[in-house]
Every structure is written in C-alpha cells, then in structure tokens.
Image: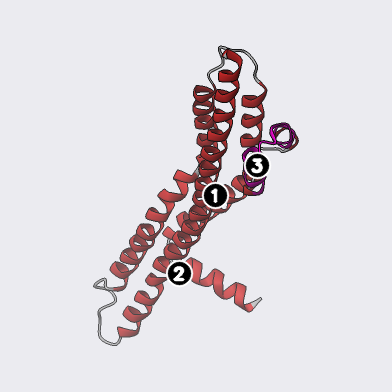
Amino acid sequence: MDFIMQGVGYFHKGGFVMYILLLCSIFVISIAIERVFYFSKADSGRKFADNFYRLMVNNKIEEAKKLAAQTKGDLAMLLHSGMTRTDNNFKIAAFFEIQSGISLAKFRSRLYYLNVIVTMAPLLGLLGTISGMISAFSIFNVQEGQAHAITGGVGEALIATAMGLCVAVVSLIIHAYFTQRVDNIVTDMEQSFSLVEAYRNRGDSDASA
C-alpha cells in the first residue's frame, strides 16, 4: 500500500504533463488489446502457411483446398476463394493484389498511432521536465537557504521525463511486435499466392490445350 501511495505522490509531483502521458499509456494498452483480438481472428498463422506450402509443392491440391477451407483468417479465405473460382474471366493475380491490400490495411490499422506516441511521449516528458525546472529555478526559490528547494524541484521535474520514456518504450515494443507479425503475414501471402497463381495458370494452359 505504501508503494502505491508513493507512486501516486510521484505522479502528482510530475506536473500536468503526467496526465497527458497517462492518457497516452491507456491509449497504447487499448490499441494493444484490440490488435491482439483482431490478429487472433484474422491471422491464419505461419503454421497454416507452411502446411499449405508443403501440400501445394507436393501437388496435393485437394488437401490444400480443404486445409484453406477449414482454417480461419484472411489468408486462408483468400486462398480458398482463389482456388475454387472456376470462371474463365477470373483474374487471380488482380484478385489477390486487391484483396490482400485491403486485408493488410486492416492489419496495419492503428499501428501508426503507436509510432506517433513513440515519438511524442519523450517530448511530452521533456516538456514536463522543462516546466518543472523553470519553476524550480524561479526567482522565488533562489533565495539564501533555499538550495534544497531547487534540487528537490529538479528531481521532481525529472519524473515527467522518466514517465515519457517508459510510455515510449512500451509503445515501441508493442509497435515492433505487431509490425513483425504484419511482415510475416506479407511473406506468407506472397509465397502462397505465387503457388496458387502457378496452379491456376497451369490449369488454364491444360484446359486450352
């Protein structure tokens, strides 16, 4: 309990900027939670992409179709749609390009805000520190016998910088994690789409022959 009360005391000593940083931290955590739920629903996973790749390479087309049909997520849905369309006018490359672009835009949604907070949080902390140091070094505190007021004021002012750095670090970690997952999804899409396009083109060539 004493630790919590001490933390609350430090928070108040950090100045008005601490409230802005608190809102930023809540916003970051909210984005992280929302993205976790979205990725769990829309990401088919690397295991699916690896299994699909092995089936296609071994020419087990029907098993690959069945795997895509039984797996949740955007990649599985797109692959199943591309492999089951039978109309001759269907341009699979254009279909994959457009639909994957829409899917990736949804995966990247809100990650930009994390990038903004990574840059903004330390600046807000620095602003709070500068504001606190201005107060600490004001003419009213530089009187004889009040040196402790100056040093104490500087120490309190640095709390805002520490808070800003903490928020930026957490935001950076979350942003890096989801960015890496998006990069993996892009790689899986490119690999899987190329196999399906080759399969479709081979089928069209056999049909025309």
Q: Which residue is mark 2?
A: 13
The earlier-in-sequence mark between 3 and 2 is 2
The answer, for residue 16, to whether it is visible in the render is no
Q: Nearer the viewer, residue 136 or 161?
A: 161
x, y percentage for residue 57?
A: 62, 40
Which of the two discs, 3 and 2, sits closer to the camera? 3
Label number found at residue 181: 1
The quadrant holding residue 65 is: top right
How crowded pointer 2 is (Cα within 10 Å; few <14, some 14-19, many 20+) is rated as some
Going 44% across and 59% down the picture, which residue do you hit? 168
x, y percentage for residue 37?
A: 66, 45
The earlier-in-sequence mark between 1 and 3 is 3
Q: Main secondary structure of the magenta part?
A: helix
Q: Which residues are magenta?
A: 47-67
Report the label total: 3
Q: Amino acid at mark 1?
A: Arg
Q: Which residue is mark 3?
A: 44
The earlier-in-sequence mark between 1 and 2 is 2
The answer to whether residue 194 is above or below residue 47 is above
Is residue 86 located in the magenta-colored stretch of the structure?
A: no
